[in-house]
Image: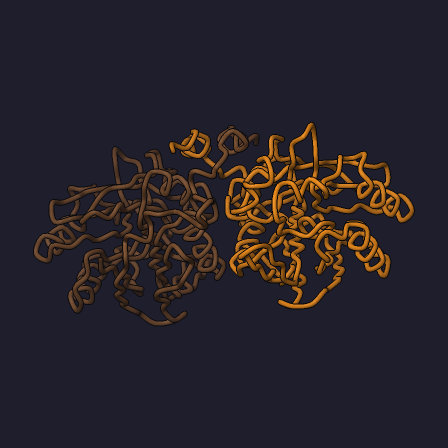
Chain colours: A orange, B brown
Amino acid sequence: MRIAFYQTSPVYGEIEYNVREALETLAAARADLYVLPELFSTGYLFGSRKELGRLVERVPEGPTVGVLHKFCRSRGCAIVASIAEVDRGNYYNSAVLISPRGLLGKYRKIHLFDRERLWFQPGNLDFGVWTFKRARIGLMICFDWVFPEAARVLALKGADIICHPSNLILHYCQDAMVTRSIENGVFTVTANRVGSERAEAVQLTFSGRSQITDPKGRVLARAPKVGRKFQVVDIDLSLTKKKKLTPRNHLFHDRRAKYYKEITRPTRR
Amino acid sequence: MRIAFYQTSPVYGEIEYNVREALETLAAARADLYVLPELFSTGYLFGSRKELGRLVERVPEGPTVGVLHKFCRSRGCAIVASIAEVDRGNYYNSAVLISPRGLLGKYRKIHLFDRERLWFQPGNLDFGVWTFKRARIGLMICFDWVFPEAARVLALKGADIICHPSNLILHYCQDAMVTRSIENGVFTVTANRVGSERAEAVQLTFSGRSQITDPKGRVLARAPKVGRKFQVVDIDLSLTKKKKLTPRNHLFHDRRAKYYKEITRPTRR
């Protein structure tokens, strides 16, 4: 299976341009699965909830899902991307998995980061995994990386590849995703963006270094800190099936769930 | 608070020598909490369960806990070490937390690695956290690092410092413990050993690189791959109390436990 990320540098608010520019780049090399960054179509740093309201789209009825679907249909591929979704007046930071047949999966970011709380509702759907070309594909978004439960739940639901559209600022995540790969025996694709955005007194610079990791913790691809980068990698999906670390150790069968009870207890505030 | 690890090179089967050598080294520098490797007193690669039977000790009645206690009492410190425990005919790969008052905490390794399954019973006690000099101290052992649930449960139970006696072979764990620190907002102390052991056709070489990490993911100390190493670090315990990543993000309060249900479901086999 051939998978790819495109580390983009979107222009804030210019959905049509950002989507077209992304797809023109993806068209340069065939892959089965392409992963694009978080909010790749809109940019990230909304000035207000009202401003976001002019950029949100319905899923799957909105134009961006439509254009992505057309691309997937014509090329027999799948795309994971994160876009700003509106549903019944609520805004979500969502990731979509589009296949030649249309919308295959949708995830709404469960762990919102910092100012996203001013703009978006926290996700209200379970972590999901969907099958494309025999690969089980799980979705999480950016800051979800800090919570080991996100990747864990996706892996326990059978994910082979965790697609991870991101808008990372700091540099911790990339190493953490190596750990996520090892502890769960999965591939991960972190598609981060580059560039800077400013709104009011806030300035953010995104940190690039998009990467693909394999179940042994190998970094199969890593982009530079700056600049757009489109990268394609062939992976051996069978690596995710064994989950054996030694002849006597299985990543999942060795779990001893009765000792993990605190993890699903509601957190006190 | 001053914490330390001693990366030892035990002589297989020579409990008295190994314990004396360790304590002579620890005596060289004052610390509040010293962490020693997994099975520091016995060595690791038992030829058989019967051979292990000659090396196990009762906790706290056995001689090693007695000697460690004497050291702690005379110096007002605590020690974490892992030893081979016997209880009602069952053998456990256990970690003990000894304070001036005697045995303060005990943990039996929950996730046994490879051939340990031939020798030991899997741990049958919950992950535990105990207080010494206002630090909440959690215990896990070596291979537990692969399971994010281990450090997570300890942190949710209030651990400030995760003490992690180890006999690591590979090199993945050290980076993973940086992630464990960040995701849980805790200090970690991985006390690994060096040297080689052989039993029958098996030869193991232990990989050193003992380390101390802080809640921001900084590596405060790291030992070399080879050679004994005793290292002492001053830490600021208040760093573990905030758990704030941004003014709007709290590592624990932001957890959304209702989406983590798979983690505590018994794993199918």
Image quadrant containing the C terminus of chain B: top right
Going by the picture, which residue comes out furthest to the right?
A74
Please state the horizontal and vertical placement of residue B159, each as a whole percent of the image.
32, 44
Identify which residue, A116 or B10, lies in the foreground: A116
Q: Quadrant of the rendered structure where residue B206 is?
A: bottom left
Which residue occupies the foreground of this view, A268 or B113?
Answer: A268
Q: Nearer the viewer, residue B107 or B4?
A: B4
The image shows a total of numbered marks equal to 0
Image height check: is B212 above or below A49?
A: below
Rendered view: B264 above or below B228:
above
Residue B21's image quarter? bottom left
Judge from the rendering whether residue B170 lies leftward or rightward of residue B35; answer left or right.
right
Report the side of B135 relative to B223 (left or right): left
Q: Is residue B140 left or right of residue A13?
A: left
Q: What is the x, y in percent for residue B127? A: 34, 38
Quadrant of image for the N terminus of chain B: bottom left
Q: Residue at x 73, y 36 (%)?
A: A105
The structure residue drawn at horizontal position 67% and vertical position 40%, both measured from the top left corner, is A94
**What residue do we see at 80% from left, 38% from top?**
A62
Q: Is residue A217 above or below residue B61?
A: below
Picture quadrant of residue A50: top right
- Whole-percent x and y of residue B251? 44, 44
**Residue B115 showing in the rendered view:** no
B117 and A86: which one is in front?
Answer: A86
Coordinates of residue B148 in the picture (x, y in percent): 47, 44
In the rendered structure, the answer to whether residue A50 lies left or right of residue A230 reads left
Residue B113 seen from this side:
yes
